[in-house]
Amino acid sequence: MNTELPLIAVIIPALNEEASLPQVLADLPWQQLEEVVVVDNGSSDRTATVARDCGAIVLSELRRGYGWACLAGIAYLKDKQSDSRPGIVVFLDADYSDYPDDLEDVIRPIVDAGYDLVIGSRTKRAESGALLPHARFGNRLATGLIRVLYGFTYTDLGPFRAIRFPELLSLDMKDQTYGWTVEMQIKAIRLGLRITEVPVRYRRRIGQSKVSGTIKGTLLAGYKILWTVFRYARRSV
């Protein structure tokens, strides 16, 4: 662990990712991390076993939903003694579409420049075919609406992100499914957090996406993201 860095924890929601998860965990810069928390979201395969074998803390969250898994990871970290809580929390997917070794780039604006939230933007460094056309369209639509309604320019709703833990708790995250990432980004704007983006690499995932890989998942995610964007435009902080 680099003593010059704040404590860093990684939360990885995972659902049936036994094939990809070992590669994700192998590529993380473990020497800089306090702990890696894999939240098994009701997998029917060996996701929990392979995560544990690779050195991760494994939590079980049987309520299906990306948000539920993230909330379980946050609750675990919040329950720790104050002196062992992380200073920074990184969220990362389990499908090996992100490059875990880009983590240093994602946390650098927090460590070196005082930012509170850093979004890893996939839009400029995604390999061909990694971001499907409907995912690109949905990103442009959602980020365009955020720019109009909230006055802040994002380029992506990518899941690879880092945030100071106290600020994460101040967001009082609620979403249990597909609206998680956009809820965080909107609440961060409304609470005046210092936000930036960094470009991250992105590749075709291992296996089929539970969201963009199916028509049902795409429609549900798109509806929930847009609902979340408009929901917070009508509410006070």
Image (cartoon, rainbow, N blue to C red):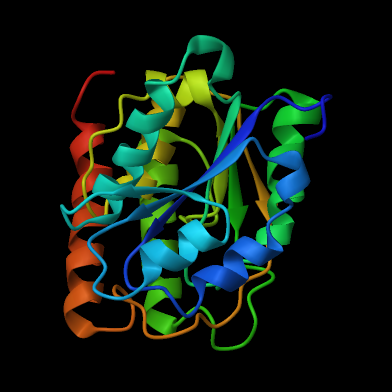
Residue at 23% of width from left, 45% of height from top?
228
Residue at 16% over, 78% down = 216
**Residue 187 image-quadrant placement:** top left
Q: Nearer the viewer, residue 201 or 1?
A: 1
User: Looking at the image, which residue is at 76% across and 38% down?
Assistant: 108
Q: Give 192 or 75, whichever is nearer the viewer.
A: 75
The N terminus - image quarter: top right
Percent of width and height locating residue 85 = 53, 21
Residue 125 seen by the camera: yes
Q: Is residue 203 left or right of residue 41?
A: right
Residue 142 is situated, as x and y percent measured from the top left of the image, at 37, 56
Judge left or right: residue 152 versus residue 214. right
Residue 59, given in percent of the width and then of the height, sits at 34, 47
The reply to whether residue 93 is visible in this rendering is no
Nearer-the-camera pick, 51 or 137: 51
Question: How many tags in the picture?
Answer: 0
Is 100 located above or below residue 134 in the figure?
A: above
Q: Which residue appears farthest toward the top when viewing the image?
A: 82
Image height check: is 73 above or below 47? above
The quarter of the picture where residue 223 lies is bottom left
Q: Is residue 201 left or right of residue 116?
A: right
Residue 89 lies, with reference to residue 136, above or below; the image says above
Quadrant in which the C terminus appears: top left
Looking at the image, is 54 positioned above or below residue 2?
A: below
Name which residue lies at 24% across and 46% down.
68
63 or 161: which is nearer to us? Answer: 63
x then y, percent, for residue 60: 28, 50
